[in-house]
Image (cartoon, grey):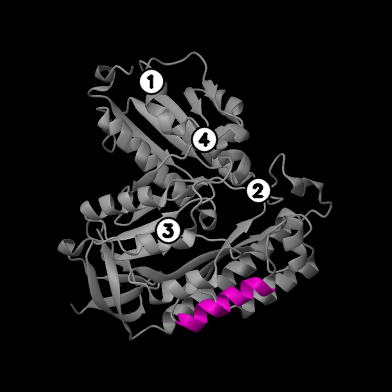
């Protein structure tokens, strides 16, 4: 039994690294702690508890996690420090040795953070508590908005794909999910709280239903019926799981936006084979063609990794030309990072850091060109924008149905309101289109 009196008048800070799923889970951890009487520390206030939710997608991510932990320990001397997330799951003993860390929680323990706080007395050395990835079985629900207007609904966790370069199955366990009914309940609660938009998140969301004998398409249809939620966005879905029936449904649905994020990883079929991906470039191109056929205005974001083992100059050029010819709106470019325990380490051909950087810069330039072209073609159109609370003295921002970032003159009362906006030219830094609210 937890003695909640220990937590009265205590304060906490939260630091998240990595994906939208991590941010959603951190928000849920914060909610649990607040319900126990732990207040979120104000800016500049020294906290009693520090919670760090980590990422481990690359070696750079690991380094950023260590830096964040060191910084928080220094900023909040004497605070009880909890570290969780993917880096904590993959390297719990390493994280536990970082000075100031008290408890390291793996993926299975993350949801029960409250019970590991004890009496908040500092430990002489960090305790590492993490199950093996085969024993990560529970699904921890999460639907939260954090500091933003949009809510993030976690529908699935874990992955069974074991791509050659990836550690996510080891960090998050096997694919599992909650029920459709439970997802609908969380969406309804978000609507009661005033939420207008929900981003559907997970590790491999197209795999939804594996642990409940349901499927992602049925989830989409059920969520579409929730009154009060005006918009859904599908955060990232594998191309082989993005079926034509899902695409067709989104094109005519009440609330699912014409916005897709699809991981490609490489535009070379030979590299895709080395990566152990479950599709080829022809399937990917067909999915893009299908989306544009039924939703010509759709925004399509694509994940790409450069410099993987085995990516020769010839393979990269193939990938570049394939991407150049795709009718997509943005590329999310990542440089390959060696991850211990992955099958990719058995591939002989290694790309130098310098070449990785050059390839990354070329793809980022291509992405900028595609995004600017997508925005430019919409200048003069009228779109609906969900506006977000601005920083003091700054203009308001929000996104159109098809994910164009829009900047308008600040009217605080329009926070979390859907408004009609006429799209104008680019703003000063080129990150958004200027808009005029017309209703």
N-term-proximal mark, 4 vs 3: 4
Is disc 4 in contact with disc 2, using a CB cutoff of under 8 Å? no
- Comes first in the chain, label 4 or label 1: 1
| Relative to 252, 106 lies left or right | right
The residues tagged by marks 4 and 2 sit, at their Cα atoms, a distance apart of: 17 Å
Say what secondary structure mark 2 lies in.
loop
Q: Earlier in the sequence, mark 4 or mark 2?
A: 4
Residue 269, quarter of picture: bottom right
Residue at screen point 37% across, 72% down: 253
Q: What secondary structure is marked by label 1?
A: loop
Query: Which range of residues does the magenta coloring cover?
Result: 282-296
Q: Is residue 436 above or below residue 82?
A: below
- Secondary structure category for the residue under label 4: loop
Can the viewer see residue 403 in this picture? Answer: no
For image coordinates 37% across by 36% down, the residue present is 29
Tell me if 111 is positioned left or right of 368 in this view: left
Q: Nearer the viewer, mark 4 or mark 2?
A: 4
The quadrant of the picture occupied by the N terminus is: top left
Instruction: Classify 10 Å Cα crowding around label 4: few (below 14), some (14-19), many (20 and above).
Output: many
Residue 285 on the magenta span: yes
Mark 2 lies on residue: 166
The residues bearing labels 4 and 1 have C-alpha atoms spaced at a distance of: 26 Å
- Image quarter of the C terminus: bottom left
Question: Residue 107 shows which numbered tag?
Answer: 4
**Which mark identifies residue 78?**
1
| Structural crowding at the residue carrying mark 3, measured as other residues with C-alpha within 10 Å and reported as few (<14), some (14–19) or many (≥20) | some
Residue 188 pos. (x, y %):
27, 53
């Amino acid at each position: 039994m937890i003695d909640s009196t220990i937590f009265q008048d205590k304060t906490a800070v939260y630091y998240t690294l990595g994906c939208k799923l991590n941010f959603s889970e951190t928000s849920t951890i914060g909610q649990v702690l607040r319900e126990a009487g732990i207040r979120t520390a104000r800016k500049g206030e020294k906290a009693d508890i520090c919670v760090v939710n980590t990422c481990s997608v690359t070696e750079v991510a690991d380094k950023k996690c260590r830096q964040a932990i060191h910084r928080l320990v220094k900023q909040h001397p004497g605070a009880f420090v909890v570290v969780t997330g993917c880096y904590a799951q993959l390297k719990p003993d390493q994280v536990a040795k970082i000075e100031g860390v008290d408890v390291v929680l793996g993926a299975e323990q993350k949801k029960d953070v409250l019970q590991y706080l004890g009496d908040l007395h500092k430990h002489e050395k960090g305790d590492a508590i993490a199950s093996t990835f085969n024993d990560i079985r529970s699904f921890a629900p999460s639907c939260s908005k954090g500091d933003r207007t949009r809510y993030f609904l976690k529908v699935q966790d874990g992955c069974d794909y074991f791509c050659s370069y990836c550690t996510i199955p080891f960090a998050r366990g096997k694919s599992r999910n909650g029920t459709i009914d439970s997802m609908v309940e969380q969406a309804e609660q978000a609507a009661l709280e005033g939420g207008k938009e929900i981003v559907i998140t997970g590790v491999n969301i197209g795999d939804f239903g594996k642990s409940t004998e349901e499927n992602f398409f049925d989830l989409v249809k059920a969520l579409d019926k929730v009154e009060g939620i005006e918009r859904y966005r599908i955060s990232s879905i594998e191309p082989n799981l993005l079926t034509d029936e899902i695409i067709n449904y989104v094109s005519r649905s009440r609330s699912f936006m014409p916005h897709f994020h699809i991981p490609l990883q490489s535009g070379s079929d030979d590299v895709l084979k080395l990566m152990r991906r479950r599709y080829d470039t022809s399937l990917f191109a067909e999915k893009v063609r299908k989306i544009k056929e039924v939703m010509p205005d759709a925004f399509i974001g694509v994940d790409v990794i450069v410099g993987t083992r085995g990516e020769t100059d010839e393979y990269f050029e193939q990938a570049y030309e394939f991407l150049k010819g795709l009718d997509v709106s943005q590329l999310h470019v990542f440089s390959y990072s060696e991850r211990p325990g992955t099958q990719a380490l058995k591939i002989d051909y290694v790309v130098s850091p310098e070449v990785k950087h050059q390839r990354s810069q070329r793809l980022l330039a291509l992405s900028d060109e595609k995004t600017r072209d997508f925005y430019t073609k919409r200048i003069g159109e009228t779109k609906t924008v969900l506006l977000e609370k601005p920083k003091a003295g700054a203009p308001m921002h929000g996104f159109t149905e098809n994910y164009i970032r829009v900047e308008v003159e600040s009217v605080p009362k329009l926070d979390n309101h859907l408004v009609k906006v006429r799209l104008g030219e680019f703003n000063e830094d080129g990150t958004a289109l200027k808009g005029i609210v017309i209703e």
